[in-house]
Image (cartoon, rainbow, N blue to C red):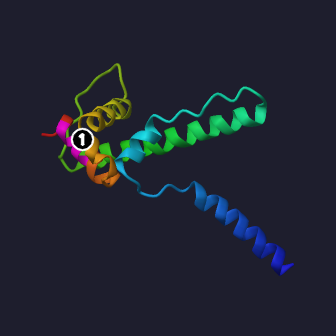
Amino acid sequence: MKVSVTLFLLLVAGKMLAQVPSPGTFGDLVQECYHQAPEHAKDTATALDASHDDGYAQGYCLGVLGTAISLLEDSGKIKVPPDPTEVPTQRAKTIIKEYLDKHSAESQRPAVLTLKKALEEKWGN
């Protein structure tokens, strides 16, 4: 019984740890923000897996961007201009993509540092 419980816990923990992203690079963050799983219309299970992958990537992206925006605004480093037609995190997705296009060498730098630079360049005080 102990062996089967231990094995079960190792399998569950391994699967959970595989889904936890590392802090990663700025390029990794941009990739997650623009991730789209390939079309898998063959059957319901693969379509659900693709949908899960897309949802996870978008949740990770928007969570990181939303947190960065909040922290940088609260500290006075940035001021997000009001725009009633678009959510700040969606605008931030565009900002980081444009920043990476202009500064491709930054793709391998830590995501948090380069994200801060990109947002401050666009919205900095």
Q: Is residue 118 magenta?
A: yes
Magenta stretch?
A: 116-121
Where in the figure is residue 28, as x and y percent of width and height? Answer: 42, 47
Q: Is residue 7 magenta?
A: no
Tell me the kind of residue under disc 1. Ala
What residue lies at 78% left-to-right and 30% top-to-bottom? 43
Examine the rendered structure and indicate whether residue 85 appears above or below residue 29. above
Q: Which residue is mark 1?
A: 118
What residue lies at 56% left-to-right and 43% top-to-bottom? 56
What secondary structure prevails in the magenta region? helix
Where in the figure is residue 33, as x and y percent of width and height? Answer: 44, 37
What residue lies at 57% left-to-right and 38% top-to-bottom? 55
Specify the quadrant that holds the C terminus.
Answer: top left
**Quadrant of the rendered image containing residue 6:** bottom right
Q: Residue furthest bottom?
A: 2
**Quadrant of the rendered image containing residue 42:** top right
